[in-house]
Amino acid sequence: WVPSGTVSLSGAWAYVPTLNSQLEVFGLVDPSLKWNCGSAGYIDQPPLVGRSALVWGTSKGYVNFASPAEGKVNFRLQTSGPITAPMGLSMPPSKAPAKP
């Protein structure tokens, strides 16, 4: 495999997009742990890693959702065009009262 873009890191894993449309995942604590996820299309942007989600888009317009510690895509959303911007995280609004 050949890396194709920016690597994303979490506390225990490194997520590496590759030229063959795979997301290769390597254990940082235990290098013998590794897995990969296939994608439909080239991965142009680094994957977004959250506590319970790993998300990345492709040049064929798919957004892939997986667990950050498992080797399978749980959900794939097809859009109408290529994903050319990085994934983003939107936090819910704070429920704290406004300051006077």
Image: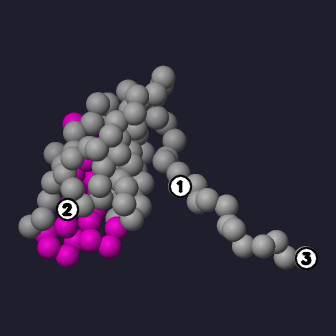
Report if residue 8 lies within the magenta region: no
Q: Is residue 55 above or below residue 58?
A: below
Mark 3, secondary structure of its residue: loop
Q: Is residue 56 above or below residue 93?
A: above
Judge depth for marks 1 and 2 and give the one in front: 1
Q: How is this picture coloured?
A: one colour
| Magenta span | 10-31
Mark 3 lies on residue: 100
Mark 2 lies on residue: 26
Q: Is residue 13 above or below residue 37?
A: below
How many angstroms separate mark 1 from mark 3 (CA)? 29 Å
User: Do the numbered discs 1 and 3 sit on residues whose CB atoms are within 8 Å?
Assistant: no
Report if residue 14 lies within the magenta region: yes
Q: Residue at x 33, y 40 (%)?
A: 75
User: What amino acid is found at the position of numbered circle 1 in the picture?
Assistant: Leu
How many angstroms separate mark 2 from mark 3 (CA)? 49 Å
Residue 91 placement, left or right of 76: right
Q: Residue at x 34, y 68 (%)?
A: 10
Q: Is residue 90 above or below residue 33?
A: above
Mark 1 lies on residue: 89
Judge depth for marks 2 and 3 and give the one in front: 3
Judge depth for marks 1 and 3 and give the one in front: 3
Measured as percent of width and height from the top left, residue 22 is found at 23, 42
How many angstroms separate mark 1 from mark 2 (CA)? 23 Å
Where is residue 8, by image quadrant? bottom left
Q: Residue at x 78, y 73 (%)?
A: 97
User: What amino acid is found at the position of numbered circle 3 in the picture?
Assistant: Pro
Measured as percent of width and height from the top left, residue 82 is found at 45, 29
Q: Earlier in the sequence, mark 1 or mark 2?
A: 2
